[in-house]
Image (cartoon, rainbow, N blue to C red):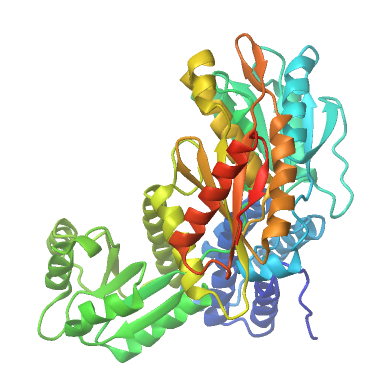
């Protein structure tokens, strides 16, 4: 029997089904381990795409699978165990079939060419509102509409029937004021989770007490918003959900003098979608680190000439590698030696022979935290956008990697009369205006576009695949939306505008000249009366 790829997510689903069928046919432990690897890879993929319901189902299957990884004598599994696993597999694929996949964008150029004019793609959001909380729902709906979401209202007694492919991006539960979730509310949440396995479920307004939050999570809630957090902050969380650009593949440097061990490690990493490079001689370490630039090192403990601990101590003296994760792989079972290795700079110690699923889990977890730490140095804390230095570096990389004939536009954006907003309403309201523009840019622009906070109330954007005229059209549409966006404060609501200047590559042929030229066009827009977008003169 030939199995066709069952869903357009990618070939991970096909691999999972195929490896399960191969195991059912032959019943070998090695085949079961390969099936476990496929399940783990799929769970990680769903987590990266922010599909919590599917991640939960896949992790449940993975837990059941790992419980059966033992020695070869336990395989093939008894019929009862195979039937139980088959039910979980069928439940997973059934949920996938009713979900609308969000396929990640792999390259900004592909995004630009495929969707050059698809700047505004409405996403569905459900608002489940308790009686007496309509005012909160009304305000939140207005915010969501401004940011391009399509809102459907319902009460807590409504059914959660969903047509295939029509599940919402998110469901927001607004409970009665001051009321904790009771059995009826928890049952409603559970029913919604079953109907919408790929949606994010939010509960707005929960006391900072662990027991009710745990109960909500068990029912299916992904994010519980505390009572003291502004409902408007939910908008930013929703905008983050649509940023599903595919991450650069993880890279692991394997330092291992055994060719057999290195081959096995690299094969395991490849099956989990992780790129790897192996070296047998640790004296090559510094040279390879500079050229390969890994996210993590898997280091053998005992090697010729010097050991893994000595190599690690050398790396920790260099600023470029002080935080690079290093995981030891060794047959060393002496606890004292392991503790010493960790004390002198290692991050974790795994004993050979290693469990391939555990190895992959450790590698991915360490790299994810390492990248999050790196990301925190590039992100503006107020808006979540790229900060000044990261935006400049990204633009410079765009100019250096641009192919012949490639085009893109750069715009400098500045909020009009921002000092007067701060002086009149205070800095917290000014921060809210800045966040409002940042969120609107995230909602209206594409995943592959550069969006950064350049400083204060000034922003920079770069739009691949656009000329200056198209960029002006897109930004002018956003300008009109921003002018109509209410920014609430204790005395009511205020409205703000922005001005922008646009310059285009390759007419302007360097990153510095692009920002300078766009900034001059921004000054023109200010002189011409503000609240407008101007193209730089040649």
User: Which residue sits at x=77%, y=34%?
Assistant: 145
Q: Is residue 366 above or below residue 220?
A: below
Location of residue 289 by image quarter? bottom left
Location of residue 82 by image quarter? bottom right
Q: Is residue 376 visible?
A: yes
Question: Quick check: 436 left or right of 308?
Answer: right
Residue 85 position, x and y percent, is 67, 63
User: Which residue sits at x=78%, y=30%?
Assistant: 127
Q: Is residue 524 above or below residue 463?
A: above
Question: Quick check: 213 left or right of 466?
Answer: left
Residue 437 position, x and y percent, is 61, 36
Residue 427 position, x and y percent, is 47, 21
Is 385 in front, or is 206? 385
Question: Quick check: 436 left or right of 345?
Answer: right
User: Which residue sits at x=44%, y=38%?
Assistant: 381
Q: Which residue is the extreme one toward the bottom?
A: 259
Residue 263 position, x and y percent, is 39, 87
Q: Is residue 144 above or below residue 329?
A: above
Instruction: Tally the marks.
Output: 0
Q: Is residue 218 visible?
A: no
Is 450 in front, or is 246? 450
Location of residue 49 by image quarter? bottom right
Question: Quick check: 359 left or right of 428?
Answer: left
């Amino acid at each position: 029997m030939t199995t066709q790829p069952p869903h357009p997510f990618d070939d991970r689903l096909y691999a999972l089904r195929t490896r399960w069928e191969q195991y059912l046919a032959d019943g070998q432990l090695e085949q079961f381990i390969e099936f476990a690897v496929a399940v783990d890879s799929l769970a990680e993929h769903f987590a990266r795409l922010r599909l919590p319901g599917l991640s939960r189902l896949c992790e449940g299957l993975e837990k059941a699978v790992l419980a059966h990884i033992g020695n070869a004598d336990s395989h093939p599994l008894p019929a009862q165990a195979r039937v139980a696993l088959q039910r979980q597999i069928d439940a997973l694929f059934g949920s996938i079939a009713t979900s609308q996949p969000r396929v990640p964008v792999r390259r900004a150029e592909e995004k630009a060419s495929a969707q050059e004019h698809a700047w505004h793609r409405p996403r569905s959001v459900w608002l489940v509102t308790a009686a007496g909380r309509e005012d909160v729902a009304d305000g939140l709906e207005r915010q969501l509409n401004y940011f391009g979401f399509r809102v459907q209202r319902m009460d807590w007694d409504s059914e959660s029937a969903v047509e295939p492919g029509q599940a919402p991006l998110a469901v927001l539960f607004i409970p009665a004021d001051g009321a904790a979730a009771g059995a009826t509310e928890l049952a409603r949440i559970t029913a919604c989770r079953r109907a919408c396995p790929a949606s994010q479920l939010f509960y707005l307004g929960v006391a900072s007490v662990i027991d009710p939050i745990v109960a909500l999570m068990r029912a299916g809630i992904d994010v519980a918003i505390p009572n003291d957090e502004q409902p408007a902050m939910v908008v930013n969380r929703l905008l983050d959900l649509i940023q599903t650009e595919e991450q650069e593949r993880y890279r692991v440097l394997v330092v291992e003098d055994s060719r057999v061990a290195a081959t096995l490690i690299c094969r395991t990493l490849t099956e989990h979608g992780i790129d790897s490079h192996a070296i047998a001689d640790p004296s090559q370490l510094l040279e390879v680190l500079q050229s390969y630039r890994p996210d993590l090192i898997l280091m053998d403990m005992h090697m010729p000439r010097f050991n893994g601990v000595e190599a690690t101590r050398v790396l920790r003296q260099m600023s470029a590698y002080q935080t690079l994760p290093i995981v030891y792989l060794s047959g060393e079972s002496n606890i004292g030696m392991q503790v010493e290795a960790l004390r002198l700079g290692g991050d974790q110690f795994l004993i050979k022979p290693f469990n391939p699923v555990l190895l992959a889990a450790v590698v991915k977890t360490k790299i994810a935290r390492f990248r999050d730490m790196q990301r925190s140095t590039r992100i503006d804390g107020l808006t979540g956008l790229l900060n000044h230095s990261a935006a400049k570096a990204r633009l410079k990389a765009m100019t250096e990697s641009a192919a012949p004939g490639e085009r893109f536009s750069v715009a400098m954006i500045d909020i009009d009369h921002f000092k007067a907003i701060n002086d009149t309403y205070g800095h917290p309201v000014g921060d809210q205006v800045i966040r409002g523009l940042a969120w609107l840019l995230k909602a209206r622009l594409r995943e592959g576009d550069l969006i950064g906070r350049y400083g204060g109330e000034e922003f920079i954007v770069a739009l691949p695949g656009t000329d200056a005229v198209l960029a002006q059209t897109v930004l002018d549409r956003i300008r009109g939306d921003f002018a109509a966006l209410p920014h609430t404060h204790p005395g009511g609501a205020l409205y703000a505008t922005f001005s922008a200047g646009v310059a285009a590559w390759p007419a302007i042929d360097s990153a510095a000249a692009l920002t300078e030229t766009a900034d001059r066009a921004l000054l023109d827009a200010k002189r011409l009366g503000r609240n407008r977008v101007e193209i730089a003169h040649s």
